[in-house]
Image (cartoon, helix red, strand yellow):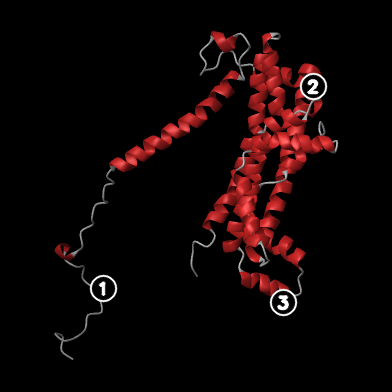
């Protein structure tokens, strides 16, 4: 073999610099007018909703005199723990009783309303029976009715059976959520496959076992949404307890704080106690939102990737 035709066994020669592909600079993101307007609107909305909460946090740290004699959006000799201690001890420790009542009404009512909505929504979505659409339209009509319009008829009905001025008078109406039934039916139609139900029936599972072991797990994002909506609705409900209850030891926080505010003309320090009580009443709602939001994220991403 000639030297001129012998193959090269050494490393390949580098390519000329002129033949190398030039690295392209990263494209610059241009700020579109629509994006700027959207960010501005979202920022204004966030300020609109967060500014009252920020003021509440600041006001809860002030004395009764500092509420009107200092700048409302900044601290002035903070005394949060002292104020909260006075809130919890005033009136023979009535505020902790109101807080427990609110947890009872909102917690138990939201759990029962979620289970009832899940069962009704699943039945309307997956079972075929006569009058199903009529029942669903009746539920939609209940969504359109404001809860305040039903308070007086409920009072007249409960007074006949002796449930006024009792915990049941507030708790029983709280377990019915027409919006929850509507949401659970819409979600069950798309999130609960018929093939899964048929497979469970073939394996010998009864309808109750299918509902509690299969359906509830598949509907978790919708159930969390219903629970939060109902929990916030019951926690902030004012008119129904006002109509149903007469003894202050059964009041929820909303009704109890209104009684303090109305008595602030005679007892000036109740103004600060009302603000401190409102600050404490926001904490359970914020905790529930932060703890349960991950279930929303899980539900939003389910089914987004095709196999």
Decide which of tag 1 and tag 2 comes sooner along the chain. 1
The label shown at residue 202 is: 3
The label shown at residue 90 is: none
Which of label 3 and label 1 is nearer to you?
A: 3
Place residue 157 in its image quadrant.
top right
Residue 14 % position (x, y):
21, 68
Residue 46 % position (x, y):
47, 33
Q: Residues within 10 Å of mark 2 (few under 14, many from 20)?
A: few
Which of label 1 and label 2 is nearer to you?
A: 2
Decide which of tag 3 and tag 1 comes sooner along the chain. 1
Residue marked by disc 2:
93
Q: Is residue 42 above or below residue 224?
A: above
**Quick one: SS at disc 1?**
loop
Q: Is residue 192 above or below residue 116?
A: below
How far is the residue under mark 1 from the one under mark 2? 87 Å
Place residue 121 in its image quadrant.
bottom right
């Amino acid at each position: 073999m000639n030297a001129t035709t012998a193959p090269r066994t050494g490393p390949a020669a580098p390519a000329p610099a002129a033949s190398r592909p030039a690295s392209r600079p990263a494209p610059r993101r241009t700020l579109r007018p629509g994006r700027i307007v959207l960010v501005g609107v979202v920022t204004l909305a966030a300020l609109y909703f967060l500014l009252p909460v920020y003021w509440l946090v600041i006001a809860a740290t002030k004395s009764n005199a500092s509420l009107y004699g200092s700048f409302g959006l900044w601290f002035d000799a903070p005394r949060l723990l002292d104020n909260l201690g006075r809130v919890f001890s005033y009136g023979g420790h009535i505020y902790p009783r109101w807080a427990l009542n609110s947890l009872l009404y909102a917690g138990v009512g939201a759990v029962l309303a979620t289970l009832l909505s899940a069962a009704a929504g699943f039945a309307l979505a997956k079972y075929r029976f006569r009058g199903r659409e009529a029942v669903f339209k009746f539920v939609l009509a209940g969504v359109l009715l404001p809860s305040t319009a039903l308070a007086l008829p409920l009072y007249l009905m409960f007074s006949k059976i002796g449930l006024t001025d009792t915990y049941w008078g507030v708790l029983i109406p709280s377990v019915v959520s027409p919006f929850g039934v509507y949401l659970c039916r819409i979600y069950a139609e798309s999130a609960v496959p018929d093939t899964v139900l048929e497979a469970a029936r073939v394996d010998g599972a009864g309808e109750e076992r299918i509902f509690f072991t299969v359906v509830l797990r598949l509907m978790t994002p919708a159930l969390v949404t219903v629970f939060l909506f109902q929990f916030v609705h019951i926690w902030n409900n004012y008119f129904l307890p006002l109509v149903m209850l007469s003894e202050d030891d059964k009041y929820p926080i909303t009704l109890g704080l209104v009684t303090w505010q109305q008595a602030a003309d005679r007892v000036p320090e109740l103004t600060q106690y009302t603000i401190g009580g409102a600050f404490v009443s926001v904490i359970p709602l914020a905790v529930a939102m932060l703890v349960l939001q991950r279930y929303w994220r899980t539900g939003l991403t389910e089914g987004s990737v095709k196999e």
